[in-house]
């Protein structure tokens, strides 16, 4: 070691320093970044522990302090430092807090199992077809109670299917025998009791529902207990009676199997789902193309003005993209009202931003040669774009567009969770109604729609990337005809989608004031506030004059033009020495404390703190008998009593942001832990060509693909029933989605490994396990880590919206704030989300760079 | 002694890569295998250590039948047979040291080795092997930071860890320039002469064959068409193995080769 770097004489000194302030010993040993990272980690972990109050986690923290001391000691001795144990300890604390914060309760996975069983069972029993039924009903009036003389009933008995009660009248609680004739032979049915208002209820006998079966002649006999069908408060007066009725209903199957109502609803929503995705993509492309040119550095880098435009456009695109589509849907729903239109707008908005970014990157990566060549011919900017840029980017653009269409299809299956469009809407609705087989039908529809459209766009993309013609025929007439058909089909689909998505541009305009107001509030997030206290000043007003004498003195800063008067008399209320330019409330206050605002939305003080209001004395001010105090007129206002502070909103948002980050972390970890072993079983090159190998491979890959097509937002609905709503449900849903997602990505990267090293290691006489560890694992670590980081990134975005449907985290609070019209608070949440997403994007890009 | 008896390999695709090939390799020989691309050289070498299972025929190594061996027995035979590859087949992201140590996997405990634990003796042996090929200073570098020639030397060091009696080299110099080719083949010659390791090496260039090999076998369309001394391999004979093809290339339609 060179003399100027000579460490302090004893290695114990830095060790001791690091024992008390982790990282400090490393810092003075010139391992600056090591010391800093260590210090920061300790601070973050300690504050997490303090916040979660999970003090058990201090145990690994103590070990971490010791580790830090030992590390400093070893560094001072000039040994090679490692991170292993520290990572383990820090991970222990981090995951410990994550488990506490996200309320993970593994036992609930077991105890909640009965709750999800109906879901699972119904997945194999979707609600597809039903037998139409024909109803045969017979009705007979019956009077309750019996009176003498008995009036004629005011409803008719049925004539074709006859019901005969044993008596024309009866009493509540009696047994009533009934015979029926002319019903469908050998079919069973149910008895109903109909109250005088015509509302039916099931008839019972000893608490059991009354069911009858007609004999071969269509006759039956049955009995029921006369119910208390009329509320006690609406009983007929003595000597009067009311007409009730008994009804027998047989529903007998008739005709052929038909699709259920569920199926036709699902069918309709499938159309809506596709239409939304289609429309959003087409409209997205139309807007994204011009924007992408503005966001391409190589086109805009020319001078300061265009560069500024480039930067602004980029920033806006990034902000739009970092807010999830579902959040936009909630925001647009405020603007144009709930419905498919809000969903379309949200999808469209996000699509424009996402596509414009992809497009602009495609533009940036084009070959500058042709541009130079065209420029050299003296062409202007549009000419350059048409002749040099477009031909180069069209294939990439189309491929990105198809890719986005896939995403939009997936998104439009869940957009219904916050609006009422698409299949997702049906799922939420049916989950809430516990209609499991209907829900299963919708979920199966989602899987099919996603799979089919994935296949279709995959086919198209393949053709485009490989440069194969879409139309294989060479005959020019056929080609022209097919082209025409494609164009017509496209236009027809567009028109149909427009219709289905209930596009209503008028609403955009009429809703604009609301939208603008919303935008204004969103532009001012609730970040800081000053604590205030309510103040009130009041003065008595006796109505009528002389009715009472006030014992409570009047405040000097509020004056009335009259001391007393009659209801309706004019009175001028004046306040002075109030805080300037402030909203105050002026009220009539009765002696018992009840109050009424003199005028709603009143009033603001002027620049000097004065306020005046012309009013008429309200009748409630009249002094009632026995009252000794007159009513008063009161001005209330909020007075600032302290300095600026962060708002409660900010604190909530920070807390929920941490919860959201930890949710994403846990879900990714769980997903990866399960996906890693599965991915080996789903990799072709590992499983080989044996029948078992092939079956496992195909089975797992198919399972991955099916499971992947259900969005986490839908899984949350199930997870919330399973383990209860909250962050744990969110973690569970994300993990359930991550396992197949990561499993697919992992197994694909296993398939891409270089077989050479495996061959070499095998040739040296190694076992299969050894070749796995020495030749395969080192190759798959970088792609696995990259995919895990990528998934975490996605999970963070996902967990910002997963709370909309019971998954906890910041999304839940966002939705609450929007529904309470607290847009300032909602804006704070969005700000936090944007910051979080950007930071993660940046960090994961950095991490990925280091990995490759 | 290595005996190849009536070796035939038919791939599932129907390609007959080896057709009834028989010859013997005596201990201490430096045998060059020549032949056109696609003539079956790689298939032959891989059938010897059973990276590829032959369709029929036998490979006998020191009285032991490799073709019928399996499991631990096969691994024990494999560890006596080192192999060097055209594309080096190193784990690029692992260190040179780890790559070399992985040549020892056939000897070490199958479970402990999974945690990266090697004995001090094995580490010393690895350093010695690296010193022998002249890149001991690169032990801690990542394999992909090395040049092609250095990577192939790591490959040789890895094979040396097996303390092999037979070394299979599948076009060990085809990815290297001529100067490096000589240096690599000289290492093989050294091992052949000093340690008495039998070498089976597929090669493409006549001058290299003449310079290094003690014996030559020629393959053509999976059949053995030459077996003799390098001196017997006149340019005319060489053309017999390669020549017609060379003429064909000039006139052949693109689908020929
Ligand atoms: N795994 C395989 N499946 C099907 N056919 C194969 C396989 N491996 C090799 N072949 C075929 O067997 C024949 C011999 O291949 P081999 O690799 O042994 O030739 P080679 O002499 O090593 O050629 P090169 O000089 O190009 O390496 C070729 O026709 C090849 O296409
Ligand atoms: Mg070969």
Image (cartoon, rainbow, N blue to C red):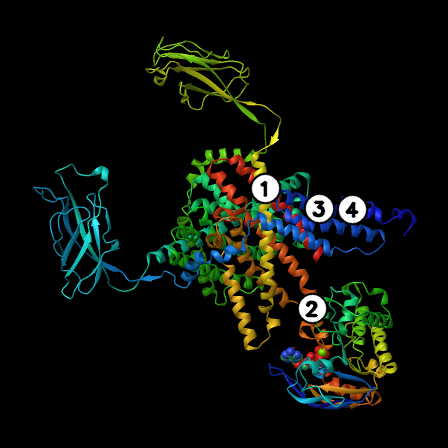
Residue B252 visible in this rendered orientation of the protein: no
Chain at numbered mark 4: A
- Mark in front: 2 vs 3: 3
Q: Which mark is residue A445?
A: none
The Cα atoms of the two marked residues, 1 and 3, are separated by: 19 Å
Q: Which element carries disc 3, helix, strand or loop?
A: helix
Above or below, comparing residue A767 to residue A42 in the picture: below
Q: Residues within 10 Å of mark 4 (few under 14, many from 20)?
A: many
Q: Report the number of numbered marks.
A: 4
Any atom of ligand 1 within 8 Å of the CB at mark 1?
no
Callout 1 and callout 3 share a chain? yes
The Cα atoms of the two marked residues, 2 and 1, are separated by: 41 Å
Q: Which residue is mark 4?
A: A18
Chain at numbered mark 1: A
Q: Which residue is mark 2?
A: A773
Q: Which element carries disc 4, helix, strand or loop?
A: helix
Q: Earlier in the sequence, mark 2 or mark 1?
A: 1
Q: Which residue is mark 3?
A: A42
In the image: residue A34, left or right of residue A354: right
Residues at marks 1 and 3 touching, judged by CB atoms closer than 8 Å: no
- Quarter of the image with the C terminus of chain A in it: bottom right
- Image spot of residue B142 (x, y percent): 77, 63
Q: Which mark is residue A655?
A: 1
Above or below, comparing residue A742 to residue A517 in the picture: below
């Amino acid at each position: 070691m060179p003399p100027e770097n000579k460490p302090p004489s004893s290695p114990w000194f830095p060790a001791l320093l690091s024992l008390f302030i982790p990282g400090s010993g490393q810092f003075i040993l010139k391992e600056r970044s090591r010391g800093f990272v260590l210090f920061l980690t300790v601070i973050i972990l300690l504050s997490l522990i303090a916040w979660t109050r999970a003090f058990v986690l201090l145990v690994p923290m103590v070990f971490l302090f010791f580790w830090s001391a030992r590390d400093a000691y070893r560094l001072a001795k000039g040994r090679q430092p490692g991170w292993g144990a520290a990572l383990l300890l820090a991970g222990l604390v981090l995951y410990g807090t994550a488990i506490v914060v996200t309320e993970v309760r593994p036992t609930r996975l077991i105890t909640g199992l009965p709750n999800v069983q109906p879901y699972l069972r119904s997945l194999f029993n979707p609600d597809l077809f039903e037998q139409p039924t024909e109803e045969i009903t017979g009705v007979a009036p019956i009077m309750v109670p019996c009176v003498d003389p008995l009036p004629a009933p005011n409803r008719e008995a049925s004539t074709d299917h006859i019901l005969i009660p044993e008596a024309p009248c009866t009493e509540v609680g009696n047994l009533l025998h009934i015979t029926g004739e002319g019903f469908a032979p050998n079919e069973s049915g149910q008895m109903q009791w109909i109250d005088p208002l015509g509302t039916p209820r099931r008839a019972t006998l000893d608490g059991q529902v009354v069911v009858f079966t007609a004999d071969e002649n269509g006759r039956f006999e049955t009995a029921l207990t006369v119910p208390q069908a009329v509320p006690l408060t609406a009983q007929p007066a003595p000597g009067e009676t009311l007409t009730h009725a008994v009804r027998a209903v047989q529903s007998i199957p008739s005709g052929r199997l038909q699709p259920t109502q569920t199926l036709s609803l699902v069918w309709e929503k499938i159309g809506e789902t596709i239409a939304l995705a289609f429309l959003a993509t087409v409209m997205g492309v139309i807007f994204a193309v011009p924007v992408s040119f503005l966001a391409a550095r190589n086109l805009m880098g020319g001078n300061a003005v265009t560069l500024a435009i480039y930067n602004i456009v980029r920033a806006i695109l990034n902000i739009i993209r970092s807010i999830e589509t579902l959040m936009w849907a909630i925001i647009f729903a405020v603007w144009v009202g709930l419905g498919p239109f809000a969903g379309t707008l949200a999808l469209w908005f996000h699509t424009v931003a996402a596509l414009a970014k992809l497009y602009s990157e495609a533009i940036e990566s084009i070959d500058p040669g042709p541009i130079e060549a065209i420029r050299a011919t003296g062409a202007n900017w549009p000419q350059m774009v048409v002749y040099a840029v477009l031909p180069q980017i069209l294939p990439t653009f189309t491929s990105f567009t198809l890719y986005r269409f896939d995403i939009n299809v997936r998104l439009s299956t869940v957009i219904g969770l916050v609006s009422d469009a698409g299949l997702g809407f049906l799922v939420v609705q049916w989950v809430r109604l516990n209609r499991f087989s209907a829900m299963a039908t919708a979920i199966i529809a989602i899987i099919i729609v996603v799979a089919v459209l994935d296949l279709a766009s995959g086919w198209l993309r393949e053709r485009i990337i490989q440069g194969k013609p879409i139309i294989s025929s060479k005959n020019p007439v056929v080609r022209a005809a097919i082209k025409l058909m494609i164009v017509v089909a496209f236009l027809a689909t567009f028109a149909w989608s427009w219709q289905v998505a209930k596009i209503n541009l008028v609403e955009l305009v009429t809703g604009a004031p609301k939208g603008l107001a919303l935008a204004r509030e969103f532009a001012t997030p609730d970040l800081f506030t000053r604590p205030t206290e309510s103040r009130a000043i009041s003065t008595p007003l006796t109505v009528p004059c002389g009715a009472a004498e006030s014992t409570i003195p009047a405040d000097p800063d509020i004056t009335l033009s009259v001391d007393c008067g009659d209801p309706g008399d004019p009175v001028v209320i004046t306040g002075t020495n109030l805080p300037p330019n402030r909203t105050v409330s002026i009220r009539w206050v009765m002696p018992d404390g009840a109050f009424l605002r003199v005028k709603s939305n009143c009033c603001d003080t002027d620049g000097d703190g004065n306020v005046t209001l012309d009013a008429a004395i309200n009748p409630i001010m009249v002094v009632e008998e026995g009252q000794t105090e007159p009513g008063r007129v009161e001005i209330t206002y909020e007075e600032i009593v302290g300095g600026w502070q962060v708002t409660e909103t900010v604190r909530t948002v920070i807390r929920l942001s941490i919860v959201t980050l930890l949710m994403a972390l846990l879900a990714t970890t769980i997903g990866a832990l399960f996906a890693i072993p599965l991915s080996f079983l789903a990799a072709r090159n590992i499983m080989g060509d044996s029948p078992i190998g092939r079956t496992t491979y195909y089975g797992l890959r198919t399972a991955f693909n099916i499971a992947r097509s259900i969005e986490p937002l839908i899984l949350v609905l199930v997870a919330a029933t399973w383990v209860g709503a909250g962050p744990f449900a969110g973690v569970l849903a994300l993990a359930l989605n991550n396992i197949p997602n990561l499993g697919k990505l992992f197994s694909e990267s296993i398939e891409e490994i270089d077989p050479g090293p495996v061959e070499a290691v095998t040739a040296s006489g190694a076992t299969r396990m050894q070749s796995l560890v020495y030749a395969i694992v080192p190759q798959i670590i970088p792609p696995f880590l990259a995919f895990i980081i990528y998934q975490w990134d996605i999970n963070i975005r996902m967990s910002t919206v997963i709370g909309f449907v019971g998954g906890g985290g910041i999304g839940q609070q966002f939705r609450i704030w929007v529904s309470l019209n607290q847009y300032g608070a909602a804006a704070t949440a969005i700000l936090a989300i944007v910051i979080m997403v950007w930071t993660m994007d940046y960090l994961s890009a950095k991490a990925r760079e280091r990995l490759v | 002694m290595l005996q190849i008896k009536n070796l035939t390999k038919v791939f599932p695709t129907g390609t007959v890569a080896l057709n009834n090939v028989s010859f013997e390799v005596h201990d201490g020989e430096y045998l060059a295998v020549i032949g056109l691309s696609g003539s079956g050289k790689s298939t032959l070498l891989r059938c010897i250590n059973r990276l590829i299972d032959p369709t029929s025929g036998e490979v006998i190594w020191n009285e032991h039948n490799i073709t019928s061996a399996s499991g631990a027995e096969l691994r024990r035979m494999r560890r006596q047979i080192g192999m060097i590859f055209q594309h080096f087949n190193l784990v690029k992201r692992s260190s040179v040291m780890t790559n070399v140590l992985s040549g020892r996997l056939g000897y070490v405990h199958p479970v402990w080795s999974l945690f990266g634990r090697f004995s001090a003796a094995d580490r010393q042996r690895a350093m010695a092997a690296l010193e022998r090929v002249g890149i001991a200073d690169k032990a801690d570098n990542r394999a992909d930071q090395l040049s092609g020639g250095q990577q192939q030397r790591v490959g040789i060091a890895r094979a040396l860890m097996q303390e092999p009696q037979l070394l299979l080299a599948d076009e060990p110099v085809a990815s290297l320039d001529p100067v490096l080719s000589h240096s690599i083949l000289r290492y093989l010659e050294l091992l052949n002469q000093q340690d008495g390791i039998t070498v089976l090496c597929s090669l493409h260039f006549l001058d290299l064959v003449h310079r290094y090999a003690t014996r030559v076998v020629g393959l053509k369309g999976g059949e053995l068409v030459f077996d003799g001394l390098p001196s017997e391999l006149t340019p005319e004979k060489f053309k017999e193995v390669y020549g017609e093809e060379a003429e064909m290339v000039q006139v052949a339609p693109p689908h020929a080769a």
